[in-house]
Amino acid sequence: MASAQATETSTTTILKRADLPALAKIASETSDFKQGRYVNGIRLEAIMLVIAAIAGSLSFTTELGGTTVNIFSAIAILAFGISFISHVARWIGKPNKRWFSARAIAESAKTLCWRYAVGGVPFNEDLSDEEANSEFERQFKELAAKAKNDKLPTVASADITLTPALQKLRGKSLPERRAAYRAGRIENQITWYSTKAEENRNAASFWGAVMLVLEALGAGLAGLHFFRVLPNLFGVIPAATAAVGTWLQLKQHQMLAQSYSVAAKELEMIAEKFPPLQNRPDDETAWANFVNDAEAAISREHTLWATAHANAAKIGGPQAR
């Protein structure tokens, strides 16, 4: 037992993105790109609508070609136009749908790689290399078919060949595979979920404070207008508040903070099972089932994430379909 534990802590192989088949890497990159397009589009639309509201509350006239024009009205028209174009682009391009699909494929590919490399279900060590490789190829072909069906051509055409890094890790002893899985998957995911939970808690608090400030500012501007100290500017506040509300609905900070915390705690509980496994250094069946439970926990969190973001995407109307 002592020698097995020493092996697990002394030499650890960590799988990186570059060690995975090209399909997994390209799916992750595609997801990041489509997420950026979708989120930046909504951010742009919200900003343009606030600018339009501000411009609509102001007036500055000038002569242009013999015609009196309101400069701020022109700014409002431009802002509305940019927002409209951005919205139509999201409607037609559906980047949110591509984002969710690519992320699901990337996560499925990653879990398949880890299951294969460390001997988890369904790639138990009692399978021959040929059988395990064949099953890996079959499941990756299914992911490629899903990518093609979801209109992700660069993902669908990506290479699905097993990498030497995955085969090398699979060929190591059980203690070495356990150490690699603990450091590269379980502890990595615990750190990721814990960090994201804290970031979302901080973001929820920040935007909650922004909403309070906007509400107080709206009341103040309304009072100043009532006493004719300022022109009618308080109409800007509802637009800004609606923009912040839309952003919060999209980002789901409070919900994500909770779900990420739950995922981190669940993985911490799974990590506590490692010591008993070290007492059974040759029990491949127990290890395969352990990996299956851990990957199932990670998959559950992703399912919750996808459901929450799919519901949040409906705030934009047609582009969510």
Image (cartoon, helix red, strand yellow):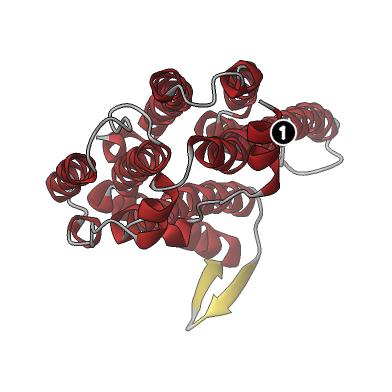
Residue 187 in view of the camera: yes
Q: Residues within 10 Å of mark 1 (few under 14, many from 20)?
A: some
The kind of residue on which mark 1 rests is: Trp
* Quarter holding residue 115: top left
Residue 77 in view of the camera: no
Q: Residue furthest bottom?
A: 65
* Quarter holding residue 112: top left
The residue lying at 48 percent from left, 41 percent from top is 173
Q: Nearer the viewer, residue 256 or 95?
A: 256
Q: Nearer the viewer, residue 163 or 285?
A: 285
**Location of the N terminus (image quadrant):** top right
**Location of the C terminus (image quadrant):** top left
Q: Position of residue 317 (x, y in %)?
A: 32, 33
Q: Nearer the viewer, residue 203 or 160?
A: 160
Q: Is residue 143 above or below residue 315?
A: below
The residue lying at 61 percent from left, 54 percent from top is 55
Mark 1: secondary structure: helix
